[in-house]
Image (cartoon, grey):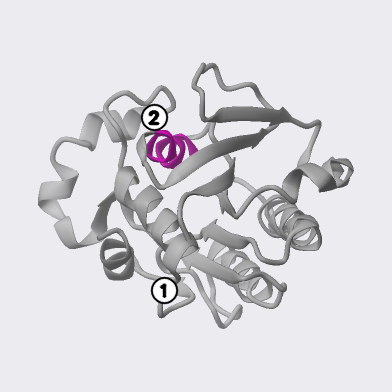
Amino acid sequence: MSTIKVIITGATGMVGEGVFLECIQNNNVSEVLLLSRKHYEISHPKVKELLVKDFFSIEQHHELFQNYDACFFCAGISSIGMKEPEYTRITYDTTLHVAKVLSQANSQMTFNYVSGQSTDSSEKGSMMWARVKGKTENDLMKIPFKGVYNFRPGYMHPFNEQKNVKPIFKFFGWFVPKLIPKQTITLSELGTAMINCSRKGYSKKVLEIKDIHAAAL
């Protein structure tokens, strides 16, 4: 495959913005569609934006989605302070709904999902968020796509020019990669790994930190 056209969710959050910034500077990506509920302020020849009320109302854009080769699903929310039903609706229900709509539009698309380190594939562990993420990964891999890749990053170092960076990352970001280098990736690496998996595939469907490093090469 030559260049690819990608759909990105979550560009107004730190992870999605970092992946987005990698895509607009990466020569292997020819077009980016930001699928968002909120506007992202940027003017770039590669970029288009589709604003929706919520991700449960995207079916009407079925024909538009047919033109894209991959989805980088980076939208997400912290589980802190949330009950399981609410967290499940946002994390599981929303992701699966988007994936099913995109699969129906173009089953030759690749779906790349940002999960999390320590996600529970058994769906039976004690950590609520890990169970929900595990179920999300498992059920995404049942949807007919050209490929589904679940990314489990640890600490993610943002681009210097990012606007959407949590204060804790700004405060600790200068020394965390030095403190735990094997548990750290850059958002540039995450974006590059997603691009490479979409273009060339990867031997695993669940990518831990060492796999993300390898896929980004």
Residue at 16% x, 35% y is 174
Q: Which residue is mark 1?
A: 202
Residue at 54% x, 38% y is 31
Residue 111: in magenta span: no
Name the element at disc 1.
loop
Q: Amino acid at mark 1?
A: Tyr
Residue 22: in magenta span: yes
Q: Amino acid at mark 2?
A: Val
Image coordinates of residue 34 in percent, x first then y, are: 61, 34
Q: Which residues are magenta?
A: 14-24
Is residue 77 placed above or below 180 in the rendered structure? above
> Would residue 86 be seen by someone viewing this image from the given angle?
yes
Mark positioned earlier in the residue sequence (1 or 2): 2
Name the element at disc 2.
loop
Is residue 127 placed above or below 94 in the rendered structure? below
Name the residue furthest front: 2
Q: Which residue is mark 2?
A: 165
Chief SS of the magenta region: helix
Residue at 55% x, 59% y is 113
Is residue 17 placed above or below 186 in the rendered structure? above
